[in-house]
Amino acid sequence: MERENVIKTKSYKFALRVVKLSKYLMENKKEYILSKQVLRSGTSVGANIEEGLGSLSKKDFINKFCIAHKEARETHYWIRLLKDSEYLECKIADSLIHDCDEILKISGKIISTSKRSI
């Protein structure tokens, strides 16, 4: 049985939440610009992690995880903006920010550990 990959699982679940968030913003708040931005960056996190996990070299692995980390930072920004502009309720935004922070911590640690082993 394959062991669970925490960052893979967390980033996928986060992407699902972001997809639902974007749908909610478009359908209920009639907000189309910011919702597309958060959708793009929030789903890109997991996609780049998947690419990194399938990479053929350590350099490519680190590069993909660095991109995922940067996309998570961007997503963090969009969620804060949605919260502060009152498109998103505090409780939901804070939960998403918490998940994003966890991904940032884990991906940052993976990047720093991987760079030491080059």
Image (cartoon, rainbow, N blue to C red):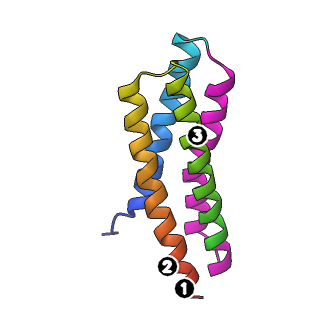
* Nearest to viewer (mark 2 / mark 3): 3
Q: Amino acid at mark 3?
A: Tyr
> Could you tell me which quadrant the N terminus lies in?
bottom left
| Location of residue 22 (image quadrant) | top right
Q: Quadrant of the C terminus?
A: bottom right
Instruction: Tell me if residue 57 can be seen.
Output: no
Mark 2 and 3 residues: CB-CB less than 8 Å, in contact?
no
Q: CA distance from mark 2 to mark 1?
A: 5 Å
Q: Nearer the viewer, residue 96 or 54?
A: 96
How far across and how far down the image is residue 4, in percent? 34, 63
33 in magenta: yes
Q: Which residue position holds label 1?
A: 116
What secondary structure is found at the residue carrying circle 2? helix
Q: Nearer the viewer, mark 3 or mark 1?
A: 3
Residue at disc 3, secondary structure = helix
Can residue 78 be seen?
Answer: yes
Give the number of the disc on residue 48.
none
State the mark number for residue 77.
Answer: 3
- The part of the chain drawn in magenta is 31-60
Q: Which residue is mark 2?
A: 113
